[in-house]
Image (cartoon, grey):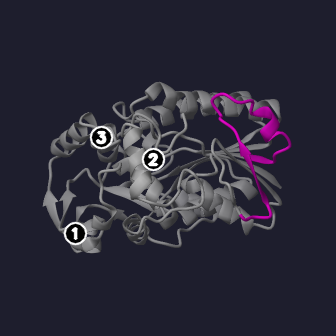
Amino acid sequence: MKVVVLGASGNAGTALLRALDAEPRVEDVVAVARRPPEEWHSPKTRWRSLDIATDPLEPVVHGADVVVHLAWLIQPARDLEQCRDVNVVGSHRVMAAVAHERVPALVYASSVGAYSRGPKDRLVDETWPTGGVRTSFYSRHKVEVERLLDGFELERPEVRVVRLRPGLIFQRGAASGIRRLFAGPFLPSPLVAPRWIPIVPRNARLRFQAVHADDVADAYRRAIVGDARGAFNIAADPVLDGETLGRLLDARPVPVPAGALRAGAAAAFQLRLSPTPPGWVDMAHAVPLMDSSRASEVLGWQPRRDAGAALLELLEGIRSSAGSPTPTLQPGGNGRLRAREFRTGVGARGPGSGR
């Protein structure tokens, strides 16, 4: 098989490349990123520099058996037009290229963020409405692409379309990149240690799911080489809430109203102390808990690491400024890298972005 991975330099993308390296049915991998790494040691993988919002996509997907669409902008959160150009318009361009080149299958990275407000005391399956959370641009964009895919499937029933909807994706190799995207330059990495986290927030709606990047990659791999269609929830146990986080970090859960958490996030964003707008807090409180039974039954997927272990691995990675050999996930959290983060305007441009 020949597989084209769009957005291959990020958190899920790097994990997927590792999984495809070990998959004997995949012989050729074209890894696409706006800023490819200078070095990547893999006999299967060829890197291409390409921007899905502006560059011709047909040549790069030509001859592919499967296109995996992971490319997405989370930053710059202060330039929503640029984010939408990549996230929504770029996704539409990907679908058009897949149709033009008669690619047999498209695997798309959706998200728990596409779901409408839902329950936190039970699990929902993939039929839960994908109306999103209005105050989150990330959620709105995921919903727009879900609707584009609905139309694409009606127009191109011969194309096998798979949508993966994972929870939060953690791995040590993405730690520096995740810190830059969500915490910004003001978070001292050495303080991300259990002994420096005495309390954690507790709120009835602040319950979320996570999964290790290698387990997400395994789900993508199974979707690529199999014949499944449709949407799949991807999440590991346990659900992460105040009590669970307290046990993991040996911290005391403290009740915090949702409004207070949102107000704090809004103030930090407004003061340019954080690159993360308050819509992320709204989304965390709103989205439902997902049932991943369909992924188990249809894809044969099971997570190998639990959500708590994945979170602890991420925190250790942030503490040690860990990363991966791509511009998106480059390791580091001090000196010139922090200075560059300040120059980007803390959410006004992507961390380390050349745009």
Q: Choose the circle earlier in sequence order: 2 or 3.
A: 2
The mark closer to the camera, 2 or 3, is 3
The secondary structure making up most of the magenta span is: loop
The residue where tag 3 is placed is 282
**Residue at figure coordinates x 60%, y 42% from the top left:** 71
Residue at the far front in the pictured view: 336
Indicate whether 166 appears above or below 157: below
**What whole-number distance in Å separates the C-alpha atoms at marks 2 and 3?**
13 Å
For marks 3 and 1, the one nearer the N-term is 1
- In reply to whether residue 32 is colored magenta, the answer given is no
**Front-most of 138 and 59?**
59
Disc 1 is placed on an element classified as helix
Q: Which residue is mark 2?
A: 112
Residue at image coords 75%, 30%? 56
Q: Nearer the viewer, residue 177 or 207?
A: 177
Expressed as whole percent of the image width and height from the top left, the position of residue 60 reads 78, 40
Q: Which quarter of the figure has residue 87?
A: top right
Per the rendered image, the range of residues in magenta is: 41-66
Name the residue type under label 1: Trp
**Looking at the rendering, in which quadrant would you find the C terminus?**
top right
What is the CA distance from the residue labelled 3 to the residue labelled 1? 26 Å
The residue located at (39%, 48%) in the rendering is: 339
Residue denoted by label 1: 196
Q: Residue at x 60, y 55 (%)?
A: 326
| Amino acid, disc 2 | Val
- Comparing labels 1 and 2, the label whose residue is closer to the camera: 1
Q: Which secondary structure, mark 3?
A: helix
Q: Check disc 2: other Cα within 10 Å, few if <14, some if 14-19, many if 20+.
A: many
Residue 52 counted in the magenta span: yes
Label 1, label 2: how far apart the Cα atoms are: 30 Å
Q: Quadrant of residue 252?
A: bottom left
